Structure formats: structure tokens, C-alpha cells
Amino acid sequence: MFLYYGGNEYIDQIELLCQQRALATYGLNPEEWGVNVQPYSGSPANFAVYTAVCEPHGRIMGLDLPDGGHLTHGFFTPTKKISATSIFFESMPYKVNPATGLIDYDQLEMTARLFKPRVIVAGISCYSRCLDYARFRDIANQNGAYLFADMAHVSGLVAAKVIPSPFQYSDIVTTTTHKTLRGPRAGLIFYRKGVRSVKANGDKVLYDLESKINEAVFPGLQGGPHNHAIAGIATACLQAQTSEFVAYQKQVVANAKRLCAGLIKCGYSIATGGTDIHLVLVDLRSVQITGARAEYILEEISIACNKNTVPGDKSALNPSGIRLGTPALTTRGLVESDIDRVVDFIDRGLKLSKEIGTVCGPKLIDFKEACHSEQFAGKIAALRNEVEEFGVKFPLPGTADL
């Protein structure tokens, strides 16, 4: 899929190169798979998929946002349709088992049988375990649904073969390119080509996704592509095929597992009980700290994270957890022994949050004011200095000469 405009001979060559490298990164046969490299990011890519394969108000099933799904998988509340996916399509969430935090595939199978979705989304935003793509495929087959894998958060791990690939089982796969793939902010849509199924009489049913997806991206949802980003994706995909990239992704997972184990040792609850990938979801309900307070105190000591829903939360605006990840730390050269120091900093920050919470009012603004009070400002500054003194030992790549 090249540009509508003339005068783009070399731009077209870059796009073709990007497509070839994207397929090669995941070991895909170009006779069986195609890829659109023009989406501006992951959310536009996902909406293009729905536009391509679902009629207006067509039915979609995705993991519920509080359980680790993404907004674009169809999130809505009892009073409001939050995502454009839920506005223009009918969405039905599937859930995790509240006892284990793991996806309840039996419930998904039962609900899909009743809801009869056009698309089942196998994808996550904050779910720390590998997905059972074979089970997803079986459920999709039972209902004649497309299986659409959103691997935005784990595509680098998939490229390095550190975790299972969705391609064997999926009809469509999307990803962002700026997360674990470590490229520019953009998106990719992979789609099947060739035979989809064979009828009882032997007639072959072919996939017709290529033109539908390409037309949904342009002219359906986008105008001109971001050609600089496409060149960046091509470079990222080339780098993702190196042994250095594989070693990096293995270290990302090793660091995440160490982070998870350290936090558990400190007494914190981890959603699903652990991690298989690059992220850790810390459930703070047992220590009676809100996600918003944890996010704020950690940012005050120069540790970036985000507040995040955990299974059972009622509001995404007032969640009970924080999401932590290791790709950026690993890029800066941290290994497992360094992660132990990170765990210590996080633990001390959260304990300080707990201490502040005993003397402040119930609102977040009360907590913030208490952080800057004479009683606590010095403690926060001292811990921030420790964190920053540790951090400068691990400079960002490419900044040594600045």
C-alpha cells in the first residue's frame, strides 16, 4: 500500500522495505501474511481493524479494562461509552478469575457462545501473563469469529522469541512500535492472506483482509502517512533481528521477574501472582495505599510509574494499583542485582506514602499538600537524592557526550 500522491518514488521504496523487514522480524511468509505500516499508532491501528472487518455496531469481545485490557478493546461503563470502539461497535468484555487474576477462558467461551462476536481480541494493556492463543483460536472457531491479537505491549518479546507468538493462531495482529519493540511511535497491522478455510465440498474460502484493512487505514481513517516514522520502523525491525536485541529482551524479562519477586518479598501483592513478560502490576489494596498516591510519591522521588486498575476495581480514575515495567531500566543497563536497589527505593517510597497518609485528609490534594509540608518534604528530598545518585550511574544510551 503506497502513497496516493505522486513524486514519492523513494518514499515508496522505504515503505516496501519496512513491510519486508516487519514480516521478516516475525518470521512470516509474505505469501501468507501482509502488513500495513502506515497507522499512526496502536489505537488507530485497532480501530482500522474493526472498521475493516465489522459492520457498524458489529460485535467485539476484549479483555475488560480493569482486568488488564485496553481502552480500544471496547471499554465502557454503566453510564458512558468511553472508547470509540464501544461507541461505534457493540462490545462485550471477558474477565479474569477474581481468585487467581488469570483470564477465565471458560467464561469467555460461554459468553462468546451467547454473544456471537464478529471479532475476539486477544490482547492486553496491563496483564502480566502470556496468553493462551490456542484456546482463543478454538473459541473463535466455535463462533466463526476473527481472532485479532493486539501484541502492542509485548511485540519486542515476541520478535525475540522470548514468549509465544500470536501469529500461528491469529487472523489479524496489531502492534505499536514504540514499546518493547523500541522503535518510533507508530503502529502495524498484520493480516492473513490465502486460504482461510475449506468447505465440506472442498471449495476453498480465501481471506479478503488485505484490501479491507488497507482501505480502512487510507482513505478510511487517515490521510498522508508519517513517512519519517515508517523509516524509523524499518530501522527498528532490522535491529530487532539481531542477537543483541534478543539478549536485551531476555534481560527485560529477567529484570521484571526479579522486580516482582522483590516486591513480593517486601509484602506487596502482585496481580496474577507474578509475571511472564516485562511488566508488573502491584495491587496496593492490602497495604491500604491508593494507586494515585503511590504514583505521586514515586514521581516525587524520581521513579516514574502509572496508577492502574487491578481486577475488582470499580473506577479507572481511582485505581488500586500501579504498573511497573523494566524495558527502560534495561535499556539503561540495569541487571538483576540493580533491580534489588530499585525494589528498595520503591518499598521505601510506598512506606513513606503510608506514613503521610496517617496524618493527611482523604483526598489526593490533601496528600500532595502533606508531601510538601515541613514534616515530610525533607524525607522525600533525601530519598529522591538517593534515587538520582543511583540513576546517574546508568546514563541513557547516546547521551554520554552531551
Image (cartoon, grey):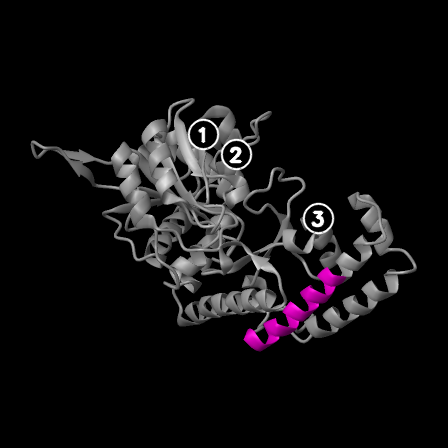
Report which residue position mark 2 lands on: 75
Task: Tell me the residue that label 3 is attached to.
Answer: 292
The CA span between labels 2 and 1 is 8 Å
Which is more N-terminal, label 1 or label 2? 2
Q: Using the image, determine if residue 138 lies above or below residue 337.
A: above
Compare residues 47 and 224 and report the one nearer the observer.
Answer: 47
* Residue visible at 42% across and 38% down in the picture: 3
Res 395 visible:
no
In-image side of 83 versus 301 (left or right): left
Amino acid found under the numbered disc labelled 1: Ser
Query: Residue placed at 52% from the left, 34% from the top?
Result: 75
Neighbourhood count class around disc 2 (C-alpha, 10 Å): few under 14, some 14–19, many 20 upward: many
Instruction: Classify residue 331 by image quadrant.
Output: bottom right
Q: Are marks 2 and 1 in contact (CB under 8 Å)?
A: yes
Query: Which amino acid type corresponds to the residue marked 2 in the rendered image?
Result: Phe
Q: Which residues are magenta?
A: 335-351
Between the C-alphas of marks 3 and 1, the distance is: 28 Å
Residue 254 appears left or right of 394: left
> Badge 1 is on which residue?
91
**Prevailing SS of the magenta stretch:** helix
Q: Is residue 239 left or right of residue 110?
A: right
Question: Within 10 angstroms of label 1, few (less than 14), some, or many (20 or more) residues?
Answer: many
